[in-house]
Amino acid sequence: MKALKFIMIGILLGIVLYKSEAASWYRIYEMFQFRSFHMYGMIGTALTTAIIIVQVIKRTKAKDSNGMQIVFHDKDKSITRYLVGGIIFGLGWALTGACPGPMFTLIGSGYWTLGIVLLFALFGTWIYGLLRNKLPH
Amino acid sequence: MLLEYIKQPWPWYISGPLIAFVMYLLLKQGKDFGMSNNLRTMCTVLGAGKSASFFRFDWKSQVWNLLVVLGTVIGGFIAHYLLSDGSAAQINEQSITDLKQLGIIDHLQGYLPESIFVFNGSLFQFSILSIGGLFIGFGTRYAGGCSSGHAISGLSNFQLPSLIAVIGFFLGGIIMVHFLFPLIFA
């Protein structure tokens, strides 16, 4: 039953990513040219809504479906890894128009060439794992 | 009538809050919204733990996220084949002109540009897709998250590292589109 819930949440996410055109290469191109409000409107309303959700959960000490209090984890403090890693991801995001969510959505939409992107994204993740101890974090 | 409306591209003010709603549903299940973690889990499932300690963790604890991935694939299928009228994204006119000049499109059509995403067996196309994939995989793990984990989950919790990462995403994207596209495609 629990498994079905996660699949259903994923289906909702997949439909929204496709229908919002956040999974469209064209929209990502246009976003990085700062020529349209569409993606900024979407990210902006997503973020505003998410901030309200997080604040309400924190202030009401809301519990999850297992009765455990919902906790938020602080990310490790650093600049290098976030900035350098972020730039590298941004280069790939702009080139393929896909981030790790839409990548899967588009495979479901029948654009199987995204499978090549996925395969090499796994390869890139593996390379990170191999080099992790040598990289500045 | 409603179905016809759903079949059109959704406006940002509907889609944005729905993305936040997905984050809420996952928080209610005691989970964090972050898609790029799945790439690490998949590496572990494929046996990457033999070569790097980074991949030695109990991947079964991440099965829930792999199920979300399975859902997004199914969602992509449903949205494309059942809930879409096939109209192209109505992007900015100047952007369309730029894409024509770069030789990426002849005219705006479809959800993705055919020259990049409809397989034609060229080394050029394969290079774009594979190098892009490498950067996504390496970059998201180095930065510890992607558009979902940093831009939505992290920023909504006022995490400074996430803001730095998102600034990085945009720096990388701007460099690619403004400076590298003319070199790659022209």
Image (cartoon, rainbow, N blue to C red):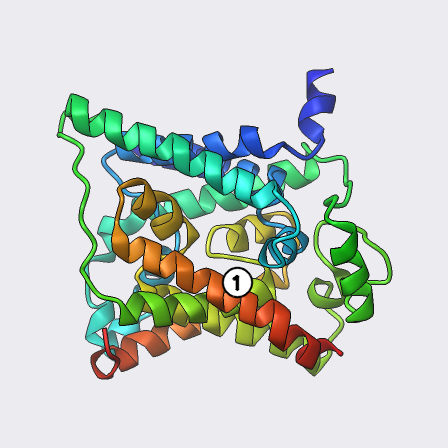
**Which residue in the structure is indicated by mark 1?**
A93
At which x and y percent is residue A128?
33, 75
The structure residue drawn at horizontal position 62% and vertical position 70%, both measured from the top left corner, is: B178
Question: Residue B51 location in percent, x, y?
Answer: 26, 80
Q: Residue furthest right?
A: B106
The residue positioned 60% from the left and 39% from the top of the image is A20
Total count of labels: 1
Residue B147 lies, with reference to residue A134, above or below; the image says: above
Query: What residue occupies the far top of the structure in this picture?
Result: B1
Judging depth in this view, the residue of B74 and B185 nearest the camera is: B185
Q: Provide the chain ID for the residue under circle 1.
A: A
The answer to whether residue A30 is above or below residue A61 is below
Q: Nearer the viewer, residue A84 or A37?
A: A37
Q: Is residue A50 visible?
A: yes
Q: Is residue A85 above or below residue A136?
A: above
At label 1, which amino acid type do we have?
A: Trp
Q: Quadrant of the N terminus of chain A?
A: top left
Could you say which quadrant of the image residue B76 lies in? top right
Q: Residue at 81% across / 69% down in the picture?
A: B101
